[in-house]
Image (spheres, helix red, strand yellow):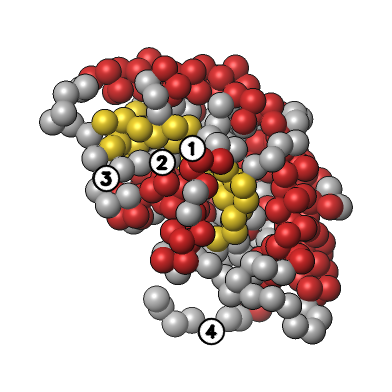
Amino acid sequence: MTRTQPTPAAFGKKQFASDNYSGITPESWEALQSANVGHAPAYGDDAWTGKACDLIRDFFETDCEVFFVFNGTAANALVLSSMCQSYHSIVCHEKAHVATDECSAPEFFTHGCKVLPVAGDHGKIGLEQAEAMIANRTDLHFPKPKALSVTQSTELGTVYTPDELHELCELGKRHEMQVHMDGARFAYALASLDIAPKEITWKLGVDALCFGGTKIGMPVGDAVVFFNKDLAREFEFRCKQAGQLDSKMRFISASWIGMLESGAMLKYAQHANQCAQILAEKLSTIPGISLLEPVDVNACFVELPASVAAGLRERGWHFYMFIGDNGARLMCSWDTSEADIDNLVADIRELAKELL
Ligand SMILES: *Cc1c(COP(=O)(O)O)cnc(C)c1O
């Protein structure tokens, strides 16, 4: 890690690099503060954790098993390791976080599962491509496909419709696979679809969901939600062994209470999604700038000419290039304002003018 001193200039400006650049929502912060009283049992045996698990069960309207871990990588890798033996494989989209951004944690925690990336438009697993991948090898010289991992919302800012998910779950079940949902941005997908959580999870056959907290404005911690309770057996041991059992767990779980009980989670997700719509509309009026993906949630993928990208960086903007050389990802957060959007758009407009 490079050592840089925090400066107001670097940290004051609201960025569009990622929804984990933003801070903590007031609801989450207040809930943490209210948990910071006196002593409480450690390792999740506290009242806040019990309540947060109940709220998550209410949220999904089912009796699921809930665990809290520190982040999404751990949630994904540990869930996949509860689904798979070492000789199994995991089918996912080629842009999936589990395939591209977890430093082989799924392979490591499953003790050798092969991740099988498949193509598909707009970051969604193509049904035919997945079917072909699964059917390609069924002999014992190739790892047996056991988990189908879908990301909702996707890495490209799109959302699987309930029908699309239904078809994928059917495919998984047909091949006796478990369905894992990477929901690092599940809240944004829910807000986008405006649907009850159960309608895009267990009712379709999702076995386990990694429900992200940080990207919707919590400080730390993802909820692992097992709809298929058989998979949850001894999961607490997996968490402990992996260094993912928080001894002061109330400071993960209290945030969830703050965000769920007040309805803040969906409110902020709607807000950030709306911001991305506004950003997309404004960007599309700039000659030379084009959108690369549909904007279903809080991300805009945009083609930025190299000089515009360089100019933006000079002006202090942070962002990731995600698609090819020129495809930038711009993400809105719970605290993005229309003024923030206007600041960014004004800079892009000025820089793009120089191209003409
Ligand atoms: C951010 C993210 C994760 C989790 O990342 P962590 O940094 O480990 O919390 C998982 N999946 C997707 C799709 C993500 O965007």
Tell me if 189 is positioned left or right of 245 in this view.
Answer: right
Q: Secondary structure at mark 1?
A: strand
Q: Nearer the viewer, residue 22 or 312?
A: 22
How dense is the environment of label 2, judged by Cα within 10 Å: few (below 14), some, or many (20 and up)?
many
Q: Earlier in the sequence, mark 2 or mark 1?
A: 2
Q: Secondary structure at mark 4?
A: loop
Q: Residue at x 75, y 36 (%)?
A: 61
Task: Answer whether labels 2 and 1 touch (C-beta < 8 Å).
Answer: yes
How dense is the environment of label 4, judged by Cα within 10 Å: few (below 14), some, or many (20 and up)?
few
Q: Quadrant of residue 26?
A: bottom right
Q: Amino acid at mark 3?
A: Ser
Mark nearer the viewer, 1 or 4: 1
Write down the residue under mark 4. Answer: 5
Write down the residue under mark 3. Answer: 86
Tell me if 113 is positioned left or right of 57 in this view.
Answer: left
Write down the residue under mark 2. Answer: 83
Res 131 visible: yes
Q: Earlier in the sequence, mark 2 or mark 4?
A: 4
Q: CA distance from mark 1 to mark 4?
A: 40 Å
